[in-house]
Amino acid sequence: MSVIRPRRSVLYMPGANERALEKAKTLPADSLILDLEDAVAPEAKAEARTRVCEAVKAGGYGPRELVIRVNGMDTEWGAADLAAAVAARPDAILVPKVNGPGDIDQIEGALYGAHAFADLALWVMIETPQAILNIREIAAKAGITQLKGFVMGSNDLIKDFRAEPMPGRENLAACYTLTIAAARAHDLLVFDGVYNDIANTEGFVAEAKQARAFGFDGKTLIHPSQVDPCNTIFAPPADAVAQAKDVIAAFADPANAGKGVLKVNGKMTELLHLAQARRMVAVAEAIAAREAANG
C-alpha cells in the first residue's frame, strides 16, 4: 500500500510567478505542483526552471508535498527540466504526455542519468488517447521503476477526443474508470483533472464529489479558492471514521477470533471491510497530523 499522507488537494502553481510560489507556503493544499509546462510561456521556461528549483531547495513549504511538473521529454526544455528538478530534490516529478510503457522506460533512464535519489516519486500525466489505450501496460511499470502516480489531464483528453465538455463528464467516464482500475491494480496514486470554471463553486463541489465517488485519491486544482472545499470533500466523514474504528476494535476482540463476518453497530461486516476501515482510519489520522502541523 502507498504511504498514507493527505493528498486531497493538489494545487498547480505557475513556476514563472515568484509571488505565487511564495503564497503557496501559506495555503492549506496538501500537495503543490510547481509547474514548468502549461503555466509558463516558452520565453520564460528557463527562468521559471531556475526559480522553481531554487524555491524547492530553499524550503519553507512545511508539510506540503512538493511536485515539479517538467516539460515533456520530447521538447527542447524537458531534459534540462528533469535534471534540474532531480537536483532540487522535490517529493515527486510530474512528466506530461506519457503515451505508453516505453515512455516510462525513457524517463527512468533520464532519472538514472541525473542520479535521482531512490525515494523520488515519478508521477505522469494521463492525457492522451494512446495513454488510455496503454494504461494497463503503463501501470505495470510500477514496482520496477520509480512510477508512483497518475494525474488525469482531462482538458487534453477532451481536445484530443475532439469532444466537448459535459457537466457530468460522461464522455470521460471510461477513461477515469480504466485509469483508476490500473492504478489500484498496481498500488499507484491517481488524481482527478482540474475544474476550469473558478467562479462556479457549486459546479466544482459537484465535480469533486464525483471524483471521490469514482475513487480518485484527490483532485488537481487551479485556484486557491478550490482548496478548502476539496479538502473537506476528500476527507473521511467523522461518522464513517468512528464506524471504522469500531470495526477494527470488533475484529481485534479475542471473542471474535477466527470470525470472518461480524455485526458492528447493526451492520454486517466482513474482513474486506476491516481492510477498508484500517485505511480510512490511517487517512483520517494523517489528515489530523497534517492540519496540526505548522503552516
Image (cartoon, rainbow, N blue to C red):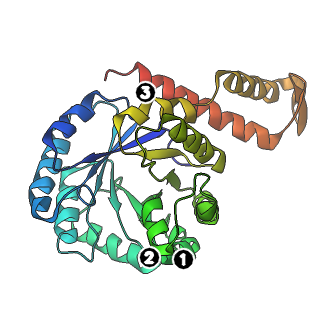
Residue at position x 71%, y 41% in the image: 275
Label 2 vs label 3, nearer the camera: 2
Quadrant containing the C terminus is top left
Do the residues under discs 1 and 3 have CB atoms within 8 angstroms? no
Asked where in the image residue 17 lies, by quadrant, the reply is top left
Q: Decide which of tag 1 and tag 3 comes sooner along the chain.
A: 1
Residue highlighted by disc 3: 290
The disc labelled 3 sits on which kind of residue?
Arg
Residue at position x 26%, y 65% in the image: 71
Local secondary structure at mark 3:
helix
The disc labelled 2 sits on which kind of residue?
Asn
Q: Decide which of tag 1 and tag 2 comes sooner along the chain.
A: 2
Please say whether residue 144 is visible from this viewpoint: no
The disc labelled 1 sits on which kind of residue?
Asn
User: How busy is the neighbourhood of tag 1: few (under 14 within 10 Å), some, or many (20 plus)?
Assistant: some
Asked where in the image residue 294 lies, by quadrant, the reply is top left
- The location of residue 225, given as percent across then percent down, is 38, 32
Local secondary structure at mark 1:
loop
- The location of residue 156, given as percent across then percent down, is 42, 66
- The location of residue 46, given as percent across then percent down, is 10, 61
Residue highlighted by disc 2: 99
